[in-house]
Image: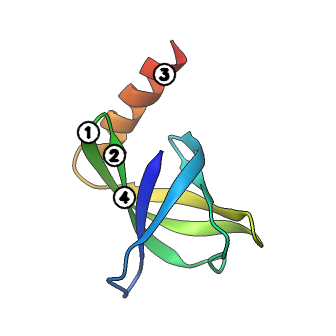
Amino acid sequence: MQIELRLEGDDTPIRAETSDLSRGGCYLQLSFTLTVGTHVQGRLWLDGAPVQFRGRVVTAHPQFGNGIMITEFEDDGEKLLASYLEAIVD
C-alpha cells in the first residue's frame, strides 16, 4: 500500500510502500532509514479515502525500512483503517 510521510518540521514528502499494516502502525520499505524517535505525519489511501495520522519511528533496519507507530489519527481515520483491515481479513 502506498504511504506518504513528512518528517515533523519538513514539508518534503517521502513516498514509500508499506509491507505490513495494523491499527497500531506500519512497516515501510525504504532503502534509507529514518532515525528512531523521529516524529512523522503520514497519509495512507484506503480504497481512495485518505487516512491521515501522526506517528513516531520505532524501529530502523538499514537498507530495509522502518517501523512506524501511529500515535494519533485525524478525523475518522482510525475507523476507516479498522474497517479496511476487517474487510481484507474476511
Q: Circle 3 sits in a helix, a strand or a loop, which is it?
A: helix
Name the front one of labels 1 and 3: 1
Can you give x and y, in whole percent of width and height, for residue 12 in the image? 36, 82
Q: Is residue 88 left or right of residue 9?
A: right
Q: In this view, does 23 lie to the left or right of 36?
A: left
Q: Quote the CA–CA distance across marks 2 and 4.
A: 12 Å
Q: Circle 1 sits in a helix, a strand or a loop, which is it?
A: loop
How many marks overall?
4
Query: Is there a contact, CB below 8 Å, between mark 2 and mark 1?
Result: yes
Which residue corresponds to mark 3?
A: 88
Q: Quote the CA–CA distance across marks 2 and 3.
A: 14 Å
Task: Identify the residue shown where x is 47% and y is 28%.
Answer: 85
Answer with mark 2 or mark 4, whichever residue precedes in sequence: 2
Residue located farthest toward the front when viewing the structure as drawn: 31
Name the front one of labels 2 and 4: 2
Say above or below: 10 vs 39: below
Which residue corresponds to mark 4?
A: 53
Q: Residues within 10 Å of mark 2 (few under 14, many from 20)?
A: some
Can you give x and y, in whole percent of width and height, for residue 5 in the image? 42, 68
Q: The residue under label 3 is which amino acid type?
A: Ile
Q: Which mark is residue 48?
A: 1
Q: The residue under label 4 is which amino acid type?
A: Phe
Q: Quote the CA–CA distance across marks 1 and 3.
A: 15 Å
Answer with mark 4 or mark 1, whichever residue precedes in sequence: 1
Q: Circle 2 sits in a helix, a strand or a loop, which is it?
A: strand
Q: Which mark is residue 45?
A: 2
Q: Quote the CA–CA distance across marks 4 and 3.
A: 21 Å
Task: Identify the residue shown where x is 27% and y is 48%.
Answer: 50
Q: Is residue 52 left or right of residue 34?
A: left
